Image: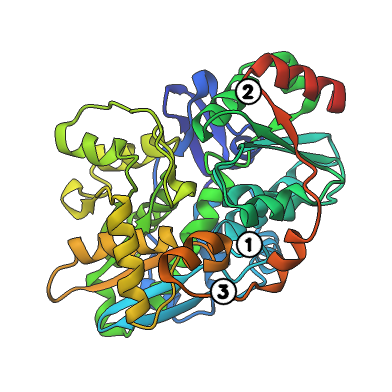
């Protein structure tokens, strides 16, 4: 029998919670994120890698969550959440792309968003819940679709007005019903700051039953661990032990999940967390000084984050030697190099949007001569139609979920960058 997963607040280690409490609470005291006190390896990784994706994912999540949920409960939740495909494509010799955009909103966040929805539906027991989240692109759509029309759950999404692609925006601002969207006059970091302010506001927190669906929520994070095991399961056995995984990184949740996987037995030897010009982490690794700069807009807008919420979790694992700093890489890729990487991939016969191209570029810089690399495609190229068509001088076909969403009117409300205005709007609408 697994033991209960105990998590502590990384800003206040005296605050300790169970998995269910962490999922329902989102953030801890002083805006601290929750993280497991211990991560134990899974016994037989070779046997685990022989299983199908849903069965293996159920075992991984049961191992991480412990005995708060029965294995039958977890298996049923995973089967409902992970009901779509993912692919591993060989792009060139010994370099593979893990495509995570075959879900309902065409982005990797479908995995975490849908599993989190299953968790909250399981744990809320009919009590009113309001999901409040900020999005720099794909989180909004994944969360909105995962919770759409779920009983007793409202979703409030803040996004930086004019700073995410139209396709990304329309996937969540056109739903209505229990999905409420605000276009904030500011950056993603401004949106994230307003979300954090709401979680420190006890009246709002209590009246609305606040929860967050950002990657700070532990349920999203553990769900994302699963697809890294699938990637390595699809590699030839002889190549698994030397695998190097490159993750396009903004808020650092996705690479955090990869690192959790490595700690519990994923045979990935090295990790690259590749950023765009918002380079807080690469600079920190170079000079050991945490100095977030103003957020810069880029082609890879979902990674336009200068204060990544998940970095404390990654740093915790590195500082406690759960994963070696020597095997962790982080480069900042500029706009010109991003476009060059897109062109190079296109010449190889692989169509990639900017985030995917950044992961590829980071992998190429870090991969050993005899290494095997996996880089992540986190979104369908058509979600960045304008930039992909402009850079590569091609015409993209729009997949049906996108063409349907683009044809609908945007229902978002404009909002000034002021928490008190948001607070009033939420209490009037949902309180």
Is 63 placed above or below 122 here? below
Disc 1 and disc 3: Cα gap in Å? 43 Å
Q: Are marks 2 and 3 in contact (CB under 8 Å)?
A: no
Crowd band around label 3 with a 10 angstrom C-alpha radius: few (<14), some (14–19), many (20+): few
In the drawing, does residue 274 fall left or right of residue 55? Answer: left
Query: How far apart are labels 1 and 2 at the CA level?
Result: 32 Å
Q: Quadrant of the C terminus?
A: top right
In terms of sequence position, does the residue under pointer 2 or pointer 3 come before the other? 2
Look at 14% across and 76% down and name the residue there.
370
Q: Compare marks 1 and 3 and give the one earlier in the sequence.
A: 1
Quarter of the view holding residue 111: bottom right
Report the front residue among 335 and 208: 335
Mark 1 or mark 2: whose residue is earlier in sequence: 1
Q: What is the quadrant of residue 355 in the picture?
A: bottom left
Query: Is disc 2 surrounded by few (<14), some (14 to 19) or many (20+) residues within 10 Å?
Result: many
Residue drawn at 83 percent across, 34 percent down: 128
> How many residues crowd mark 1 within 10 Å: few (<14), some (14–19), many (20+)?
some
Circle nearer the viewer, 2 or 3: 3
Q: Residue at x 49, y 36 (%)?
A: 7
How far from the left and from the top, in percent, is residue 209?
A: 76, 28
The residue identified by callout 2 is 199
């Amino acid at each position: 029998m697994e033991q209960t997963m105990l998590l502590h607040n990384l800003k206040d280690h005296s605050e300790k919670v169970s998995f269910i409490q962490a999922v329902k609470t989102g953030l801890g005291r002083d805006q601290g994120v929750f993280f497991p006190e211990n991560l134990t390896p899974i016994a037989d990784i070779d046997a685990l890698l022989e299983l199908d994706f849903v069965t293996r994912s159920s075992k991984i999540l049961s191992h991480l969550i412990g005995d708060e949920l029965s294995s039958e409960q977890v298996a049923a939740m995973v089967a409902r959440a992970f009901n779509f495909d993912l692919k591993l494509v060989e792009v060139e010799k010994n370099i593979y792309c893990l495509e995570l955009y075959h879900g309902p909103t065409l982005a990797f966040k479908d995995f975490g968003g849908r599993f989190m929805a299953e968790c909250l539906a399981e744990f809320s027991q009919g009590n009113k819940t309001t999901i409040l989240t900020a999005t720099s692109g794909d989180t909004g759509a994944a969360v909105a679709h995962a919770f759409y029309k779920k009983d007793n759950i409202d979703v409030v999404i803040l996004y930086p007005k004019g700073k995410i692609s139209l396709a990304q925006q329309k996937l969540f601002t056109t739903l209505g019903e229990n999905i409420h969207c605000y276009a904030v006059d500011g950056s993603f970091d401004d949106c994230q700051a307003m979300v954090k302010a709401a979680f420190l506001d006890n009246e709002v927190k209590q009246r609305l039953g606040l929860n967050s669906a950002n990657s700070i929520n532990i349920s999203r994070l553990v769900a994302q661990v699963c697809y890294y095991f699938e990637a390595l399961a699809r590699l030839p056995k002889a190549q698994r032990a030397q695998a190097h995984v490159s993750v396009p990184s903004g808020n650092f949740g996705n690479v955090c999940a990869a690192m959790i996987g490595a700690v519990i037995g994923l045979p990935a030897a090295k990790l690259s967390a590749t950023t765009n010009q918002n380079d807080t982490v690469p600079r920190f690794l170079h000079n050991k000084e945490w100095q977030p700069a103003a957020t810069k807009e880029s082609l890879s807008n979902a990674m336009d984050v200068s204060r990544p919420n998940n970095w404390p979790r990654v740093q915790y694992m590195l500082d406690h030697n759960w994963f070696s700093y020597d095997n962790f890489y982080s480069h900042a890729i500029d706009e010109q190099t991003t476009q060059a990487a897109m062109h190079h991939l296109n010449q190889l016969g692989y169509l990639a949007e900017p985030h995917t191209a950044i992961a590829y570029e980071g992998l190429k810089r870090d991969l050993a001569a005899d290494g095997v690399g996996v880089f992540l495609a986190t979104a369908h190229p058509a979600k960045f139609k304008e930039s992909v068509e402009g850079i590569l001088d091609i015409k993209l076909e729009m997949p049906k979920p996108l063409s349907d969403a683009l044809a609908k009117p945007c229902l978002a409300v404009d909002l000034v960058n002021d928490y008190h205005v948001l607070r009033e709007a939420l209490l009037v609408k949902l309180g």
